[in-house]
Image (spheres, helix red, strand yellow):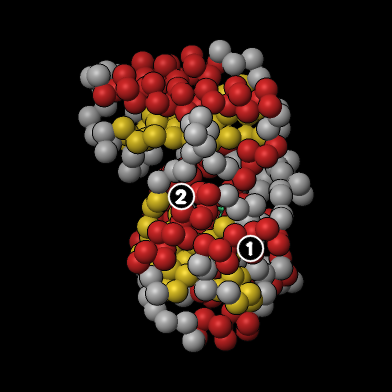
Amino acid sequence: MDVARTVEELGDARRVLPGPVGFVPTMGALHRGHVSLVEAARADCASVIASIFVNPTQFGPTEDLARYPRPELQDLAMLEAAGVSLAFLPAVDVMYPEGNATRVRVGGIAERLEGASRPGHFDGVATIVTKLFNLVQPDRAYFGRKDAQQLAVIRQMVRDLDQPVDIVGCPTVRDEDGLALSSRNVYLSAAERAQALSLSRGLRRAAAVYADGVRDATSLRQFVEDEVRAQPLANIDYVSIADATTLEELAGPITGPALLSLAVRFGTTRLIDNVTLGE
Ligand code: PAF
C-alpha cells in the first residue's frame, strides 16, 4: 500500500492506479465499519484509495476535535490488511493552507437534525468531501449508513454540483450486542456503554412495532424516547422520524420510507444511530 501525505504525492500515485477507483474517506480510528466500506469498494473497483483526515472544520468549538483518537500506525495496518491500494493522510495545512476562505454549504436537508444540533458541521463535511473528491478523483465513494444524514447531504451535494462520483451507501456495522460501531465508542465507560445499547434496542423495537402495522409517527418516536429515557446516564439530543428523502419531520401516519434517527449524549460522548422504516 502506498501512503501519500501531500497533494503532489497523491497525484503521482493516483495517476498510475488502474480504474475504476473507489474512495473511502475516513477520520481514522478505524473499526470494522470502515473495513466494510473498503470491502464494498474492493468488490466493485480495481483500486481503492482511503483517506484519514480529522477534519477540523466539521467540529464545533466545544466538540471533541482535540481528543479525537488518532492511532495512525494501527489505522495504516488495518487499511493495508483490508486491501487498500493508496492511503492519503494529509496534514491540516495541506487541506486548509493559510488564506483558504471557501466553504461548500448544502441547504435544506443539511439544516435539520445533526445540522440543527451541530451548526456548521455539514459545511465542514461538504467542504472536505468536495476537496477530497477533487484531489482523489474517484469513480465511486463509499459512506456508512450510520451517518444517514451525512450520506443524504453528500448525495444532494454531488447532484447539485455535478460532481462526477457515484455515491454508495453501505450498511451500519454493529457489535454483537447491537451497538453501532463508531470511533467515539472508545470514550464510553462500561456503564455508559451498557446504557447506550438502548439506542439500537429502541430502534429495533420500534421497527418491529412498525412491521406489526403501527404507522403513527408520534407513537413510534415516543416508543424510542421511552426506551432511551429509562437510562439514567442518557441525555437525548433528538429522536426523529422524518421523510427518508427530504428529512422533514413527520407527524401522523407514515406513508412512505421514513428515517427513524436519534442522537444521545452519555457524559461528553454523543452517539447517533438510525433505521429506515418502509424501505
Ligand atoms: O464520516 C466521516 O468520517 C467524516 O465525516 C468524513 C466523511 C470522512 C468527512 O470528514
On screen, 139 above or below 182? below
Query: Is residue 251 at least partly visible in the picture?
Result: no
Q: Is residue 151 left or right of residue 124?
A: left
Q: Residue 249 falls in which quadrant of the image? A: top left
Neighbourhood count class around disc 1 (C-alpha, 10 Å): few under 14, some 14–19, many 20 upward: few
Q: Residue at x 71, y 55 (%)?
A: 71
Please say if the residues under marks 1 and 2 sit with CB atoms less than 8 Å apart. Answer: no
Q: Seen from this angle, which residue lies furthest front?
A: 81
Name the front one of labels 1 and 2: 1
Residue type at mark 1? Ala
Q: Is residue 30 visible?
A: yes
Q: Please say if 32 is above or below 278.
A: below
Decide which of 70, 84 is in the foreground and name it.
Answer: 84
Q: Amino acid at mark 2?
A: Gly
Q: Is residue 110 above or below residue 6?
A: above
Is disc 2's CB within 8 Å of ligand 1?
yes
* Identity of the residue drawn at 49% across and 38% down: 174
Res 77 label:
1
Mark 1–mark 2 Cα distance, whole angstroms, equals 21 Å
The residue lying toward the viewer, choosing from 24 and 124, is 24
The quadrant where ligand 1 appears is: bottom right
Q: Which mark is drawn over residue 102?
A: none
Which residue position is annotated with label 2? 144
